[in-house]
Amino acid sequence: MTPKSPAAASSGQVLQPSPDVLWRRLDDEVILMQLRTDRIFSLNHTGARFWELIVAGMDLESIREALEDEFDVSPEVLAAEVEEILALLISEQLLIPQES
């Protein structure tokens, strides 16, 4: 199955970590390793929080609401940053759409 593009992800879309990803929180960061490609990624404090909310099974709309409550950021900036991190995580096969 080909991952959906972030533009195709609806606000109710639930994504999950790929089974080929290992991750660990280290202080304010989350370190991800894609086992298929041996690539390592580091997510900053806000990216780490985004990842944790994904892992918790939250849909994108709930994640946006939680991040807006937790961080001092405008809805427009938050929407752009969510789309950016989704593009990265999906293109690197770190996140996949949850099977129904």
Image (cartoon, rainbow, N blue to C red):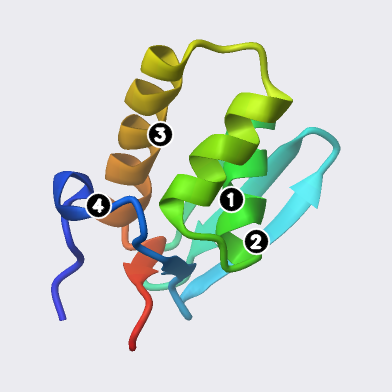
x and y, in percent, of residue 41 in the image: 51, 44
Mark pair 2, 4: CA separation: 17 Å
Mark pair 3, 2: CA separation: 19 Å
Question: Which amino acid, mark 2?
Answer: Trp
Mark positioned earlier in the residue sequence (4 or 1): 1
Q: Which residue is mark 3?
A: 82
Mark positioned earlier in the residue sequence (1 or 3): 1
Mark positioned earlier in the residue sequence (2 or 4): 2
Q: Residue at x 34, y 62 (%)?
A: 13
Q: Which residue is mark 2?
A: 23
Residue 8 in view, yes or no = yes
The label on residue 51 is 1
Q: Are there few (<14), some (14-19), or many (20+) residues within 10 Å of tag 2?
A: some
Looking at the image, residue 71 sits to the left or right of residue 87; the answer is: right
x and y, in percent, of residue 90 in the image: 30, 55
Snapshot quadrant of residue 78:
top left
Mark positioned earlier in the residue sequence (1 or 2): 2
Mark positioned earlier in the residue sequence (3 or 2): 2
Q: Nearer the viewer, mark 3 or mark 2?
A: 3
Classify the position of the C terminus by image quarter. bottom left
Q: Nearer the viewer, mark 1 or mark 3?
A: 3
Snapshot quadrant of residue 30:
top right
Snapshot quadrant of residue 1:
bottom left
Q: Which residue is mark 4?
A: 91
Name above or below for residue 60 compared with residue 58: above
Q: Nearer the viewer, mark 4 or mark 3?
A: 3
Name above or below for residue 22 compared with residue 33: below
SS for callout 1: helix
